[in-house]
Each structure stands twice: as C-alpha cells, then as structure tokens.
Amino acid sequence: MRRVVAISNGKGGVGKTSLTAGLAGLVAASGYRVLTVDMDPQGNLRRDLGYPDADQGFNLTSAIRDGAPLVPLRGVREGLDCVPGGATLSDLPATFISRSARGDVMSGLSTVLGQVRPEGEPHADYDLVLIDTPPGEPILQDLVLTAADYLVIPTRSDDASIDGLVTVAQRFMRARESNPGLMLLGVLLFGVGARSTRLRTTVRAALDDILEGAAPVFESSIRYLESAAIDIRRHSLLPHELEASQLAEKSERLARLRNREGAGAERLLSRDASGLAGDYNALARELLEAIAEHENHRLLTNPAAAAGA
C-alpha cells in the first residue's frame, strides 16, 4: 500500500526540498520502493538528487492537465524513482482558473499517482511517495493536499517561517473537505543549532500553542550545518551519502600522508556530517513509525475502510 506524504510550508527556505530528498534516499536505501514528485516550478529537487533538468516539469504538467501517462525517471537511486518539476508547472494555475469545473483539475495529481507503478512491477506499488510542495502557489499546494495521505510541515524558528506554518495548516483544514483522509502527521524543526536545546523547547511549545494540539511536533529535528549543505547541493550527495564520502576522503588523505604524497586537494568542504546523517535517520524512523501507528489505529477502529485503502 502506498503512502503519499506532502512536505509543505507557506514560506520558502524552511527545508522542504532537502527533507524530501534526504528522506527519500534514506528510506529507499533501507529497501523500500520510493517515488519523489517535485511540484515546485523552481525544480530544485534535481540539485539534491542529481538528475537532469531537461524535462522542466513538462511530463508532470501534461499528466495532471491532459491525462498523459506519468513517466518517472527510473533508478535515480536504488529503489528511488523521481518525477521532475520545473518551470512548466507554472502553467497549471492558469489552467485551473480557465476551467469552470474545479474537480477535473484538483483531482489530476491524485489520478496520475494512482496509475504509476515501479518499473517492471505492474502489480506492485510504491511504499512511499514524497511530494515537494512549492511555498507560494496556492493552487499547486491544493493539488498536492488533495492527493496526499499525510502532511509534514517543516519550519525554522523565525516568525516568518512560523507564519508560513500557520498558512499551510489553514490550507490543510480546507483540503480535508475534499480529502477527509488527509492527516497532519507532524511539524518538524529544521535548521536549528545542534546544541540549541532551550530554543527547540521554546519553539515546540509555541507550535503546540498555535496548532492547539492538532499535530505533534516531531522529537527529531534537523540541525544547521552550512558546509554540509553546500557539499550536498554541489555534489548531489544526500546526508547519509555525504557521511560515507567524508569517511572515504579521510581514508584517502591518511593513505597519501602515510605514503608521503602530501594531503592533496580536498573535494568536500565539510569534515563530519555524522550528526546531520543521524538527524535524518532519527526522523525517517519517527516518520515511518508515526505512519504505521496511524494505519494500525485505523485498522482497529475501521477495518472495512482500511481494507479498501
């Protein structure tokens, strides 16, 4: 059974794309079949995952608007397929406005996602679909929330980011009118200092107050590490891949020094991404456990609905 998770906030720069890529690659590396969908006209997910930008969101736009087959890029990582975004997605709001029937557009993403399957497995399904959602286009956000089973809201600790959280929480409440199964899975603190314990506690309390207990705040958080962020984008390495690359580079550097060859040029700016990789590991585990807990509760309270999902 596939689980479609939207990652959304009404403000940019809060880690949506980084989270989509990092979680997708990590979950796929654990043996799951994962699909990412980049619904952002900026198409920045390709930078983190390292796939080409030639499509510019054309296939995704055609699939939603015209019912064309959705054709993901296969094998971006082992077990990970990707649907690119890009500038062509900017055409969708105009399509929405020009059509009198809202439903034929708003259900488009849900419809095409229901049809796409992992390559060579026509009777199988993706275990997890992660959708990177743009911050500033309400119609594209509505498309995603109509198609999703779960919503994750990342936020930084500044007031503008928290305002964006409130905005997407309000869109979530409206989306439930047409998609009553949509669940707000949790709020994630992104880009906080590794030792900012008091700050994390304060922000968690503020978020709980804003949301009035409507969603948990994840115990996991993603720390800020600028040099690692640069390496991730520059080399299209996910946090767990960056950690492995750092260890390999360190071994090569020590080998050169032992052989009196000099340290040599270093490819990576960051030296230790183990903490960042650990943050993503903890978050992936917490997210999957939260989904499993919700599905088990749904099975116990409504067996017929769970069986039909």
Image (cartoon, rainbow, N blue to C red):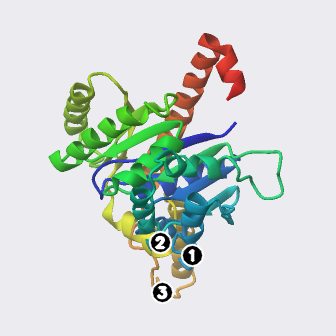
Query: Most extreme residue toward the left, as rendered?
Result: 159
Rendering coords of residue 115 (x, y %): 71, 50
**Residue found at the very far top of the displayed protein:** 301
- Specify which label sits upstream in the sequence, 3 or 2: 2
Q: Position of residue 164 (x, y in %)?
A: 25, 46
Disc ID at residue 88: 2
Left or right: where does residue 28 sit relative to residue 281? right
Label ID, residue 262: 3
Amino acid type indicated by mark 2: Thr
Residue drawn at point x = 27 percent, y = 42 percent: 167
Residues packed near mark 1 inside 10 Å, few (<14), some (14 to 19) or many (20 plus): some
Q: Give the residue at mark 1.
A: 55
Q: Is residue 25 visible?
A: no
Q: Is residue 91 visible?
A: yes
Q: Position of residue 247 (x, y in %)?
A: 54, 64
**In the displayed structure image, the side of residue 129 where residue 21 appears, left or right:** left
Up-down: is 158 above or below 273?
Answer: above
At x 82%, y 52%, the residue is 121
Amino acid type, mark 1: Asp
Q: How many marks?
A: 3
- Assign a secondary structure to mark 1: loop
Distance in Å between CA atoms under marks 3 and 2: 49 Å
Q: Nearer the viewer, mark 1 or mark 2?
A: 2
Q: Position of residue 162 (x, y in %)?
A: 22, 43
**Image quadrant in which the C terminus is located:** top right
Between disc 1 and disc 2, whose residue precedes?
1
Q: Say if mark 3 contacts mark 1, CB within 8 Å.
A: no
Quadrant in which the N terminus is drawn: top right
